[in-house]
Image (spheres, helix red, strand yellow):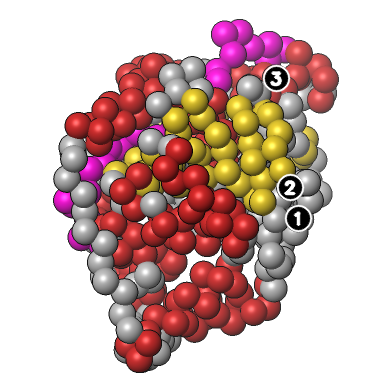
Amino acid sequence: MKIAVVVQRYGADINGGAELHARYIAERLSTHATVEVLTTCAKDYITWKNEWPSGDSTINGVTVRRFPVSRPRNTADFGRRSALVFERTHSLNDELAWLDSEGPRSPALLTHLSKVTGEFDFFLFFSARYYHAWHGARLAPQKAILVPTAERDPAVGLSIFGPLFRGVRGIMYNSLEERALIQGVSGNQAVPGVVVGVGSDIPERTQPWRVRKKFTLKRPFAIYIGRIDENKGCKTLFEHFDRYVAEFPRGLDLVLVGNAVLEVPSHPRIRHLGFLSDEDKFDALAAADVLIMSSPYESLSMVALEAWALGKPVLANGRCDVLRGQVIRSNGGLYYDSYEEFAESLFALEAQGPIGAVLGRQGRDFFRRHYTWPVIERKYLDMFDRLRRDTSVQATEPWPGWWARRQRNLPPAREVLDGVPAGPVLR
């Protein structure tokens, strides 16, 4: 069996999001099949500037083929087009122009994909909202398996994505909430799909004392791991924490791990360690009392799964359906909708608190049942087997004509999204 993983950017030093997800899956599936990665030369997800050379390379034993991005993203143009399709009545052509502006635009990648369609059994397209996934899946619909990594943001309400969600052979969802969201906007219940998520390479042993010594972390602390960005809820996190330390002078410190897009406040109880190696990251997570996940938008939180794997409780932003649902289903943490809930939950989840250790253990059991690598790999292999046995092919939906694509009669994407029921999936 030969599998292509098609993703917007790819590299050993990309440590989060759909790109890390794609690398983990590519490397794990390479023990069961021949795997190639088709991606762009872009390294930065904001500009899509070509930084890696085009051509072939090998990363952790997997062949990677890179293709140039035809132009970097014009952020001003993308912002204008986003405002149009998200907030105003618009046309199908407006949405296609938005997709083109978002990028990463790589006609060379699509040309290569069209030439090698017959060489692969399946194409795994990561991140539904990007240029390569939308166009690529239309080139090989009978072999396309989508890993949407969709969040509850307006993009999922665009009309162009309905035919994509309905037209692929299979979908590997990250969570029950993501599946409910996509089925709500597209009505794609007939497409074979499974909630699978992703595993993580959890070390057998961690050394929390080592990272405490290395970074002089003397006090108990809560940890945040990820991009430090307003879109990840960090601005509100800083506001909540500023009130928390005033009210709880003996409470937890806050340690941040990751690259900062938002300025980190200068505060004696806040430490920003920057980007860390996996060894340091896991040691820091093991040394923490609790992981804080402040993001309001997630399709799945890999770092929350890693925290549970180490027996650490998670404090999640309750406004994120996915995080709230995962916390409830796992019994592995708490969630907050206000400052008061944030502060009281931190108190409860401290190592000396009443329930942190219990919830951490329950989170670890949840991880072992659903997110260890044998479980993840089996779900992918079962999907491949299922689709190979099922010879029926979903008919490709006809594309509207020249005039219909230019009619400004599509509702704002945010309005479409608001019409889809929200909240965690508890069953």
Relative depth, front residue between 150 and 398:
398
Locate the C terminus and report the quarter of the image it occupies: top left
Please provide percent x and percent y for residue 314: 47, 33
Q: Write the start and end of the magenta stretch as one range.
A: 184-209
**Closer to the camera in the image, 265 or 234:** 234
Which of the 4 image quarters holds residue 153?
Answer: bottom left
Give the label on residue 91, or none: none
Do labels 2 and 3 touch, CB within 8 Å? no
Q: Position of residue 391 (x, y in %)?
A: 18, 40
| Foreground tag (1 vs 3) | 1
Characterize the local packing of mark 3: few (<14), some (14-19) or many (20 or more) Cα atoms within 10 angstroms. some
Residue 415: say if magenta.
Answer: no
Q: Amino acid at mark 3?
A: Glu
What secondary structure is the stretch in magenta mostly built from?
Answer: loop
The residue that mark 1 highlights is 50
The residue lying at 71 percent from left, 67 percent from top is 71
Q: Position of residue 195 (x, y in %)?
A: 30, 37
